[in-house]
Amino acid sequence: MKPDHSDSQDQHGEEQARGDITRPVVLIAIALLLLVGVLGFWLDAFYRASPRFGAGVPASGPFLLLFLLAGAATLFPLSRLQPTRRQLLAIYMIVLVGAPVTSYKVMTSMLVHSTIQRYLGMTSKTQWQDTFLDLIPHWLSPTDWNAVEGFYHGAGAVPWSVWWTPLTVWCSFLVALAVCSVCLMFLMQRQWISHERLSFPLAQIPLETVVDSETKSGRRTGRLTTAPVFWIGLVASLGLTALETLSRYVPTIPAIPLGPIRLMHWHPVGPLAGLDEINLVLWPWLIAIAYLIPKDLAFSCWFFWFVRLSMHVIAIAAGATPQRPAWHWVSEFPAPLFQGTGAVLAISALAIWSARRHLARAIRIALSRESGRADADEPIPYRWSLIGILLSLSWMVYLCWLAGSRIGVAVVLILVILVYYMTWVRLRAETGLGFLPYPLFLHQSIVVPLGTAVFTPREMMVIHAPHWTYHGSGNSLVAVPGNALASMKMADAAGINKRSVVLGMAVGFLLVVVLGAYITLTTIYHYGLYNIGAGTADTHELNVYSSSLHNHFVNPSTMDVPGTIAMGAGALVTFFLGAMRLRFWWWPFHPMGYLAAHTWVMYMYWSPFMIGWIAKTLVVRYGGLRLYRRTVPLAIGLIAGDLLNEVLWGMITLVTGLPFRSGSAW
């Protein structure tokens, strides 16, 4: 009988994977994370550079770091260190998870929300002072007027004595939300990666860019891929986007326009107003992502957009007031954003339902003596995931209760945030995009079906306070669990020990929270929020609070019946599409595409999805899956070239101070 060496080989592979992610590798990754965090903050704060540098989807800053490390691996002095592919990818993953924290949509926006209520109360009329100041807990924001005014107009030094308490509270809420959502993703990751086999197009970018190379001594190291089609795509994309960006600075330089190219203006009169303006977008990265995702999903994204336009045409023909479909914010038919909110809730429910057996098994293992053995290949044991969820959820609910909310309202608020996070992460795992879902704001999804009259004034303040946690795009805190899930996919594909990487992610995340709070406060107090680039965006938060809160306080409302019906209709359509897709393999419509069509930005994104779907359909039909697999590196190269262009012009902006004018900005 021959000896079975499979177990010993598997054990050797596991030991090798664990040995690759050493303590020096983790420390280097954390140091590089802090560097990327500072650069990302500086670009965001002063030049309003693309949020894709630090966070965003895809994130260009972490990719540049991976690209440079892999490119320099064969040069002096890195040739002596000879980093492996696993080590390079582990560094990338640790940076990817922590980088969003210092972006202006996370740390800066969080600090704005910690001061804005008191700022409005102190600068508004007498009745506003009574309304706001009496409702704000003294520990939730600085109480000193000079400290609040200095935040917006500049005051030199940071008054740390009045900031320690509110800063601790808000940062603890940020960490708790990140822990809760990441632990939730760790519970779901096996279902989505191994069982449902979602496409994870963004995880393919680093996996295709960095490959293994064997040295003369037999040791495997990491390096950039030598696939010709990858470099053809990278050079073509980088050349097109860089030239178009250069022509924005120097209009006399000719360039191929990549969009948005306006094909038809909006007609504000008659049923044709329902068609909106028609734009052609040729951004390489977006077309490539549409090429990588499943065909039915790419098809559904643009198909349901035209279904949405047809509904607007019908509504206007029936007597509705003509308005642009992309900015149809009201709850009257067809109420697209309300339908999209219903789709968000339904997709989250479908995700939990499809994972019910996996979740039941995970909970059973977590509560049994098998914990630690049966889940040894998980990022963290199931028991610790459940503990992390319960503790962080309890802390967030406790803070809301301490601020004046009833326990039930606090639980609903936190659960709605987690529902949005789960849907966004699931959508990104399937489509690779981060602009979704962006139908209604968080507080609207609660207020529409319940009204505002059922909430106390303090509860309305609490419901509005975490608006910063979700902006509907990949440059807010929602990118953290999304990047963590994508990292687990990369770890699975590359054979990386997950627990070593998760430990580095946790330490790096906590350090970058501290660094982000420090550099954000010191910079804002030195210049004043209104005097930096990010302040121009955060003035929108002032409008949100001054209009929305004032309306809720002065005119308490009941249920928005048309909006609630539209949310219910969106949920029913999503459930129907999901059920049909599970029952019939030939069903061509994807529920994620329905959600995508009911977000405002789809008026620009429908054309790249159509182009990517047509290209993939033709390649598969006439060349088969073999040709498609050969062209995947080309698509990855197109995305990589676009990301490098983002960083290139970001660095030029940082050095020269020129305004940031990306060729494929959001």
Image (cartoon, helix red, strand yellow):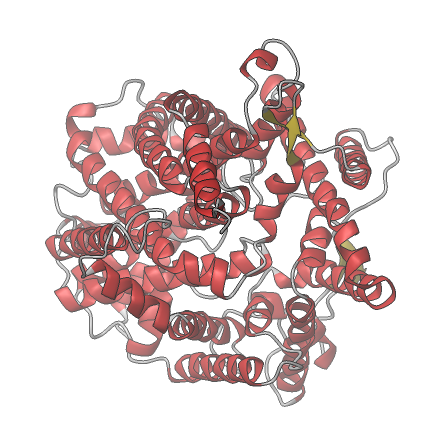
Q: Position of residue 431 (x, y in %)?
A: 59, 59
Q: Is residue 282 in view from this perspective?
A: no
Residue 312 versus residue 501 in the image, above or below = below
Q: Relative to 231, is 168 on the left or the right? A: left
Query: In the figure, is residue 357 to the left or right of 471?
Result: left
Q: Farthest residue in the bottom direction?
A: 318
| Label tally | 0
Residue drawn 28% across the image and 32% down it: 149
The picture places residue 420, in percent across and down from the top left corner, at 40, 62
Which residue is more in the foreground, 130 or 583?
A: 583
Residue at 59%, 36% (x, y): give it: 60
Q: For this view, does 548 lie left or right of residue 230?
A: left
Q: Is residue 486 visible?
A: yes
Give percent across and percent down for residue 586: 67, 81
**Residue 342 or 219: which is nearer the viewer?**
219
Residue 591: % across, % down: 55, 74
Is residue 565 positioned above or below 401 on the image? below
Q: Residue furthest front?
A: 1
Left or right of 74 on screen, residue 549: left
Q: Residue furthest top?
A: 77
The residue at 26%/22% (across/down) is 158
Quarter of the figure with residue 8: top left
Res. 253 image quadrant:
top right
**In the depicted view, which residue is nearer to us: 443 or 273?**
443
